[in-house]
Amino acid sequence: MVASLRSPRRLLVATFLVIALFLILARHGREYVVGPAQAPAPATLHPEHEHEHGGESHIVVEQKQDHELELVVASVKAENTSWFDTYLPDWHKNIYVADDPHAPLTVPRNKGREAMVYLTYIIDRYDDLPQNVLFVHASRFAWHNDDPDYDALPTLRHFRLPYLRATGYVNLRCVWVIGCPGEIRPAIDETKKDEAEKIQAKHIYKEAFEELLPEVPLPELVAVSCCSQFGVTRETLRSRPREDYIRYREWLLATPLDDALNGRVFEFAWHIIFGKEAVHCPSAAECYCNVFGFCDIPCSDDSCTGRYTLPPFSSLPKGWPLVGWQEEERNFTGPL
Ligand SMILES: *[C@@H]1O[C@H](CO)[C@@H](O)[C@H](O)[C@H]1NC(C)=O
Ligand SMILES: *[C@@H]1O[C@H](CO)[C@@H](O)[C@H](O)[C@H]1NC(C)=O
């Protein structure tokens, strides 16, 4: 190449080509200034779009079967949800990945924690709901799971569907600690003690409640055992029009409140949304027996012997459930 450029005519042609190339690039360069924002999108979206359609039509066929029960799982990418398939292979699962826009099931925006997932499922499936839905978090072991090992698996395996059918809404947590017998006094708690007090869900609950549930008189006291895992029947879900759930999700999408706050508003509103009294704290004995079939165990109002105890920290020790808080070995007998 270098040798050939020594000929004057070739040099002239080469110079012309370089200038022409420069002009073409300069022109395209200008176009690219506005181009990339739109141009690459169709190329990458297109195949997924087709894939989605393929997936959807398949799911629609399956949904016509009128499932007795479906699981709705609120997860993020960092959580490993394989245990649902391993231990509950026959369950119909809807595993949402809130922070992955390319996941088969996801949400319009990763905001509002599990509330965004639950609402999105209800909105999208409103006309095609199974008879019963369990709404749960993704982690098998989590401090709030109502089990001596904080293991969600036994709570799902023991869950008594007939009781859900009979009552329409069932909290997956029986122990009272965190949420019962009283959590929020909306009218009183609206006012912060002083400016220094950090804003909490109880401070914004009244305003949020009045926006979300204008037809329900503001409760004096709100109580339900915590943590937003529950079962609901199709009938209960449909006791509200789809528009209500759309409105709740729009509130969630629009609110300037932090996730920790807006998610907690729903945590202490689901039971009211589903028609239960604002104070929903069945005795632990009644609850463990009805919900999980653990009957005839010694109980006080708020807890039962051998069941849940509040852990010292919300993050479980490394190695749990085989390793305990003092790095001691634990006799965990469940499947791993
Ligand atoms: C998820 O957990 C399963 C079983 O505990 C394990 O086999 C698998 O490798 C894990 N997946 C990831 C991505 O960590
Ligand atoms: C676990 O089992 C061992 C041996 O069977 C026993 O010595 C130990 O006390 C048990 N630990 C707990 C916490 O139950």
Image (tube, rainbow, N blue to C red):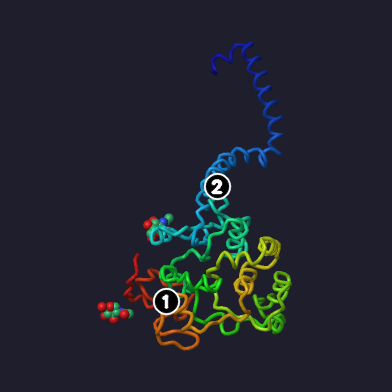
Quadrant of the rendered image containing residue 273: bottom right
Which mark sits nearer the N-terminus, 2 or 1? 2
Question: Residue 52: percent from the left, percent from the top?
Answer: 55, 45
Element on which disc 2 rests: helix
Question: Residue 129: percent from the left, percent from the top?
Answer: 56, 59
Check the picture and name the quadrant holding the C terminus.
bottom left
Q: Which residue is mark 2?
A: 56
Q: Is residue 104 left or right of residue 199?
A: left
Is ligand 2 within 8 Å of the beta carbon of the residue shown at mark 1? no
Question: Residue 100: percent from the left, percent from the top?
Answer: 55, 53
Quadrant of the rendered image containing residue 183: bottom right
Element on which disc 1 rests: loop
Q: Amino acid at mark 1?
A: Gly
Ligand 2: give its quadrant. Answer: bottom left
Quadrant of the rendered image containing residue 262: bottom right
Residue 1, labelled with which disc? none
